[in-house]
Image: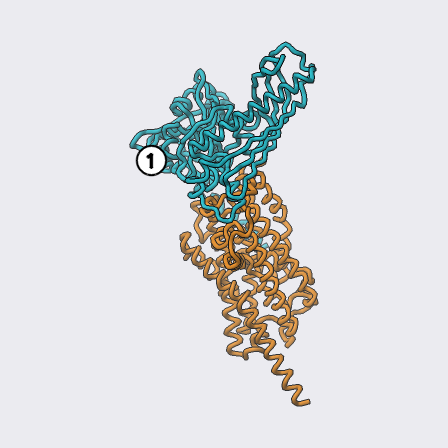
Chain colours: A orange, B cyan
Amino acid sequence: MMSSQPPKYVQTPPFSAFFLVHAMQIGVGVLGFQRVVMEASGYDAWMSVLFAGVGVSVSIWLMYIILNTYEADIVTIHKLLFGSLIGNALSLILMIYFFVVAVVILRTFIEVLQVWVFYDLQTWVLSVLAAVFFWFALNGGFRLVAGLCVFGVLFPSGLFIILYLPLEYAEINNILPILQHNFQEVALGAKETILAYIGPELLLMAYPFIERARLSHKWAQMGHAATVYIYFSVMVVSLLFYSEMQIERLIWPTLTMLKIVEFPFIERFEYVGLFLWLIVVTPNIALCLWASSRGVKRIFSIRQRTALYVMLPIFATLPTFFADRQGIETFNNAVSTFGLYILIGYLPFLFIIHQLKRWLKGGRRNETN
Amino acid sequence: MKRTKCVLVFLLILTSCVHTEIIDQIALVQTIAVDDAGEDGFEKTVTFPVFLEQGEESLMETKALSTTSSTLKEAKTLLNMRSQRPVSYGQIRTVIIEDDYAEKGLEHIVEPLYRDPLIGYRLNLAIFDVNTKDVIETIRDRDKERAGVMISEMIDQNQEHENIPHTDLHRFLFTLYSDGRDPVLPLMTTIDDHPAVQGIGVLTSGKGKLVHTLDLKESFLLKLLLSGSKEGTQIFNIEEGPFSGQALIDQIDSKRRIKVNEDGTHYEISLDLKGVLTDFTGETNTDEPKLISAIEKTVKREVKDDMENLVKTLQEKGVDPIGFGEKYRSQTRDWNAEMYYDTLYENFNFDVDVKMQVIQTGAIE
């Protein structure tokens, strides 16, 4: 069971789970998650954000119960639970999902750049550049990727103070009276919010790389709590800032909101925010690529570098196939819906299978006694 | 070493991969003026600074170009056809609109501004009751390099220190797309060829049609109700017992509260004003406590009367720049904007309660 345990010197301390989870969750989603949530629960959207936060927290808890029992990554767990063939097939689907998430994040970020700053920027220019960058980053191994996460969380954290500045225009009447929507609508909004929360499932691959990984559970939960806090504040600020029909028209409400921030030395702050966002999305993509290449390595027993030789060229070309808003939107929705079902569907399912199997085993042992 | 080389190669290859805009090689539009052009849509005039290439280095001039079109973005293309340098919208400070065009609705003017990520949210919009192209051309000839930002700074200054409520692109969009409040914009005119603020224009939500105008006094009251004012000036005629004369109250600081009952039929408006007496034309010494209380009494009465008149007029006109609808929406569970404005808005009762305190009389007594 411990066959795939990586050597001690590539492991990271337990608290790195905080940065892994948080860095993975905060990504391009923050720029525009408000609209979809509000479509469901309107001005009660902030409650949806909190509910979804609790849901994902339970998911993380279930994930840790499974991981703590086997002390291995998902590839091993799949094999043990479902046998070699089905197990590997399931793992492969998961790895393809991680890989596609990396592509989605990259494509979405390039789209934002194309709309806001470089309207004549070719998609391939940035995607090829990114592929080269991630080649170097991933060659540094897990520790470097984790380092990117720490950097990607700490460095832009100053930006979140900026997100409060639009409160200058706050209209408290917007969110009153609370609970205008029924429970069903709020729950539907919560489902939409989970799309923005996806990310903790990366721990399924990263777990063996964390030292004394059992201890990392509380750090993972704290990372998630920090995410909930940020999403919640961004949501509340947006609700107070925009009127309902105004926000419905925006693709990236968070970014547009930063238009109001003005300093004597820099007139339009959203451009700074946009480029700081590059630092936020970089660890996102790096983690996804790392996890999927690591998974491919484990499934096919090849070197991780060999896997990257194949994956990075695909990573660089795929974004160019999504040329327009509709395409990117559909792609985004499909991938995040899949992620949603992994987080709130597949993980609990895995948990049940795991418990069943343990119970069966336990039962048999009792008989032999 | 290999990596360093690689990085260097990329640095060289990737410079100027994308379109660049160099400040003295583009026409950086500062003001857009929109005039009604009948069936052709509107006539759009833009001003941008021009850096003189020869002669004195610091010399700058403002140029104006105009074209007629029915969409703002098409107008940009048409302007480019006449411009020496490409027109760029990144630094727009003001959009001024002729009232004739504003009556047709501003929706098609602000939509493209909203869509364009280059355009800031703090840009000022204003309505002129004269031809805006003329306004622009006059100030261009007179103010040279400052012409582009002049109107914008004027509006800012008036909103900050005087009697115009805060308006900018974000606030305009907020109210334009709100179902409980109508947008307002500064209304301007020209006095001796010089632009001047003369009040407030009230527009409809959604289409943004100019439907009603308020003078400076009403605009001040609106400001008190909308955001509360920090600075503001009003003059009052005092005719109270032995005292008579004109009193100028400055730096009016206000707190306001609007309450609505459960079914939206009754509103309570309370205002708490504090001000500094800066000028009194009467004979009496301002030290006299009776005078101060007389002034306070008059101010209370006048503000109350004016406020009642203002709200009544707004009710009659069916426009809601104060946001009574919004207030009611925040307290009811069955909000229906159409129903509210069709039946409730015109008929609700209200009470106005004004408190006034003169806190200073300046450096002399």
Task: Name the residue: 39% across, 34% down.
Answer: B209
Q: Residue B281 location in percent, x, y?
A: 60, 12
Task: Name the residue: 65% across, 75% down.
Answer: A2
Can the viewer see residue B42 in this picture?
yes
Residue at the farthest left position: B39
Type of amino acid under label 1: Ser
The front one of B25 and B337 is B337
Residue at the farthest top position: B283
Can the viewer see residue A306 in this picture?
no
The front one of B162 and A354 is B162
The front one of B95 and A246 is A246
Q: Is residue B263 above or below residue A137?
A: above
In which quadrant is the C terminus of chain B drawn? Answer: top right
Callout 1: chain: B
Name the residue that disc number 1 marks: B70
Mark 1: secondary structure: loop
Q: Residue B292 location in percent, x, y?
A: 66, 19
* Residue A282 in which image quadrant: bottom right
Q: Residues within 10 Å of mark 1 (few under 14, many from 20)?
A: some
